[in-house]
């Protein structure tokens, strides 16, 4: 049987043949590509020639590219278009991949060659020197220098963690999909805009039901909490959302935390956070703690004042109860409308998805000279996916860009950027990337196009910023290209793009009413800009709470005896802004830190916000469409990946190190 996952693609640009790939191809493809990769590793480790940078470190960097291709397709589809069969394959594949990873990282012959090259300090170009240092450090951090018994235990931990992290994500998705609210009485829809009702009616139809079906997926959950006047139903939805996987993932969290702790100690680190932070910009727990504190101390009083103002506003409008978490979105929307006269229902018709796509791509053209051509001849993995050829200013091919916008039960919630193949160079060939963004925007319904909230426009820009980081990459080594940068640097290109969502000069280029064609009124734009920092203190503290919770789990010296919920309440007690609700917790569905790669790294969202606040100030000084500033950002940030220390890359662009006060000023907290 010809396996399209292992056969060179004859699609344009070598794009994946999604039209030929079947689920039964995955397991054989993994087995064969792992076999090939092991053969390549053996050839490097057993090379009779003296170890050199070329025959050892560079050779290792390019080993296993077939496996990387299979992983790039399978695991992206596991998130974007999954089903029980895919999950079953993942459970089989996960230990195979962990075993292969250990086959490499605990390979004593291979490590001895790398250590010898590292000790010889060869004269290399800057990216080569960084690759050598990072490779040596990676092997040490992966247990290669441990004695045999400790090395064996390290491998067992890694294998078990791989399964547990996969299980955490699967159980979170299952808990999200397990709940739905079917309403059959139109009176229960009071307060919900027509577009929300239409989407809910369509969701019910897809299930063969009569009525209006609401779920915990963001396009359904968010508007319901914001607009429904039925406080009892809001409470029901909120409790369901915030208790997801509380029972099933609680034990998983404790085992993950315990194993991460043991793994770090085997390597000589005091805590898992000490281990995780070493290769990042922050470097140490003390730096992260100081950073979070510098933001929290001035922000917490502001957040509490905002919540008191919200409570007073609600009380002044006939609400006689204590403000609870399920009241927050509802009364915040009303207060925002009252204070700034910003009505999401009035704004939404002006943000047609198709027009927004053109505007976002047009912004990339205005800043970086890029153009996007939709290609109908390139296979996709789902009928909703669109694919574009990305061209540089000179017309040269840069990348393929896949866009998967709409929710479905086979897709996890949220929004993210990923890649089916990252950019790298080998010999004279520059392998250009296949980049993808996945979102959960409201589907078109009842003859209407997909209409976005302004927040969704901001989300689109965010993920597109990640995409630019991938598409514009000009590196040599795969591990240094695109978004393969320090965790606390990776959000800079994405978060800086969000700023254009508040720039009148950009909004005016595309925001048109989908029925009348009328431009978004200037007064609406002014209100959006004025409302930008509405409840900025609360939003800041909310993100800092996530960062504090993450660090609390990963700076533990031993696994806590108490359950997840009381542990979490204890950690966050000093910075709460709303009442605690028994039977709910964030940790059991906190995929970022327990299954998504942000363990001891959630602070990085705020770290990157500081970077982008300082960086965007340069655009504001020179003009938000200034090509010279954009060219510098492209050259020093977007093209460079991690080919040089990220702190140096940032200074090369901005001319100085950023300070947290840049963000506090931007948010109006200072």
Image (cartoon, rainbow, N blue to C red):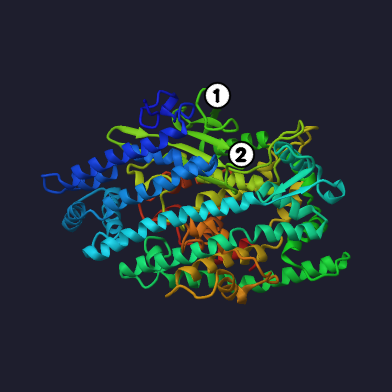
The quadrant of the picture occupied by the C terminus is bottom right
Query: 387 or 28: nearer the eye?
Result: 28
Q: How many marks?
A: 2
Q: Horizontal and vertical percent for residue 311?
A: 79, 69
Residue at 74% in and 55% down: 225
Label 1 sits on residue: 376
Label 2 sits on residue: 405
Q: CA distance from mark 2 to mark 1?
A: 17 Å
Left-right relation of 358 to 395: right
Residue at 49% in and 74% down: 560
Mark 2 Cα shell of 10 Å, populated few (<14), some (14-19), many (≥20): many
Q: Horizontal and vertical percent for residue 326?
A: 74, 62
Residue 631 appears in the rendering: no
Above or below, 263 against 473 in this view is: below
The quadrant of the picture occupied by the N terminus is top left
Which of the 4 image quadrants contains residue 55?
Answer: top left
Mark 1 Cα shell of 10 Å, populated few (<14), some (14-19), many (≥20): few
Residue at 51% in and 49% down: 493
């Amino acid at each position: 049987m010809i396996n399209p996952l292992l056969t060179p693609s004859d699609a344009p640009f070598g794009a994946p043949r999604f039209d030929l790939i079947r689920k039964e191809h995955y397991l054989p493809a993994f087995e064969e590509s792992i076999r090939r990769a092991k053969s390549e590793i053996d050839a490097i480790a057993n090379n009779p020639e003296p170890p050199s940078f070329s025959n050892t470190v560079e050779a290792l960097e390019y080993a296993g590219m077939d496996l990387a291709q299979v992983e790039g397709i399978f695991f992206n589809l596991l998130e974007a278009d999954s089903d029980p069969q895919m999950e079953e394959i993942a459970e089989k594949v996960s230990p195979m991949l962990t075993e292969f990873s250990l086959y490499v990282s605990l390979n004593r012959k291979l490590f001895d060659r790398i250590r010898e090259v590292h000790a010889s300090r060869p004269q290399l170009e800057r990216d080569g020197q960084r690759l050598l240092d990072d490779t040596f450090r990676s092997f040490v951090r992966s247990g290669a220098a441990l004695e045999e018994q400790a090395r064996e235990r390290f491998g067992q931990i890694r294998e078990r963690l791989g399964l547990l992290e996969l299980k955490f994500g699967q159980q979170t998705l299952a808990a999200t999909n397990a709940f739905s609210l079917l309403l059959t009485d139109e009176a229960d829809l009071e307060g919900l805009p027509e577009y929300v009702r239409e989407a809910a009616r369509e969701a019910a139809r897809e299930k063969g039901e009569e009525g209006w079906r609401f779920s915990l997926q963001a396009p359904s959950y968010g508007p319901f909490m914001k607009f429904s006047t039925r406080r009892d139903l809001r409470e029901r939805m909120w409790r369901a959302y915030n208790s997801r996987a509380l029972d099933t993932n609680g034990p998983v969290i404790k085992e993950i935390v315990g194993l991460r702790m043991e793994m770090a100690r085997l390597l000589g680190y005091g805590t898992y956070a000490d281990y995780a932070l070493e290769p990042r910009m922050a470097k140490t727990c003390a730096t992260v703690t100081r950073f979070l504190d510098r933001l929290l101390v001035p922000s917490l009083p502001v957040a509490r004042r905002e919540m008191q103002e919200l409570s007073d506003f609600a009380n002044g409008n006939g609400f006689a109860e204590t403000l609870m978490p399920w009241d927050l979105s509802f009364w915040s929307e009303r207060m925002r409308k009252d204070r700034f006269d910003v009505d999401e229902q009035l704004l939404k018709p002006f943000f047609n998805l198709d027009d927004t796509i053109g505007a976002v791509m047009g912004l990339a053209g205005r800043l970086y000279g890029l153009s996007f051509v939709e290609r109908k001849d390139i296979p996709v993995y789902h009928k909703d996916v669109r694919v574009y050829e990305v061209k540089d200013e000179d017309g040269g091919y840069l990348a393929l860009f896949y866009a998967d916008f709409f929710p479905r039960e086979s897709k996890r919630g949220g929004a993210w950027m990923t890649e089916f193949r990252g950019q790298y160079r080998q010999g004279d060939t520059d392998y250009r990337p296949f980049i993808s963004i996945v979102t959960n925007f409201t589907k078109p319904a009842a003859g209407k196009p997909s209409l976005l909230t302004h927040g969704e426009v901001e989300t689109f820009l965010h993920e597109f910023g990640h995409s630019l980081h991938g598409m514009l990459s000009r590196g040599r080594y795969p591990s240094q290209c695109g978004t393969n940068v320090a965790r606390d640097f990776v959000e800079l290109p994405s978060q800086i793009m969000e700023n254009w969502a508040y720039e009148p000069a950009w909004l005016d280029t595309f925001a048109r009413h989908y029925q009348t064609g009328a431009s978004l009124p200037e007064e609406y734009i002014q209100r959006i800009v004025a409302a930008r920092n509405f409840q900025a203190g609360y939003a800041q503290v909310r993100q800092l709470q996530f960062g504090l919770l993450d660090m609390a789990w990963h700076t533990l010296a031993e696994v806590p005896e108490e359950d997840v919920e009381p542990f979490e309440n204890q950690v966050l007690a000093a910075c709460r802004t709303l009442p605690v609700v028994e039977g709910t917790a964030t940790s059991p569905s906190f995929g970022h830190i327990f299954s998504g790669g942000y363990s001891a790294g959630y602070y990085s969202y705020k770290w990157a916000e500081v970077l982008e606040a300082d960086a965007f100030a340069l655009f504001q000084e020179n003009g938000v469409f200034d090509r010279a500033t954009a060219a510098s950002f492209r050259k020093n940030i977007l093209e460079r990946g991690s080919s040089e220390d990220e702190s140096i890359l940032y200074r090369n662009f901005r001319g100085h190190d950023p300070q947290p006060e840049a963000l506090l000023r931007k948010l109006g907290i200072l």
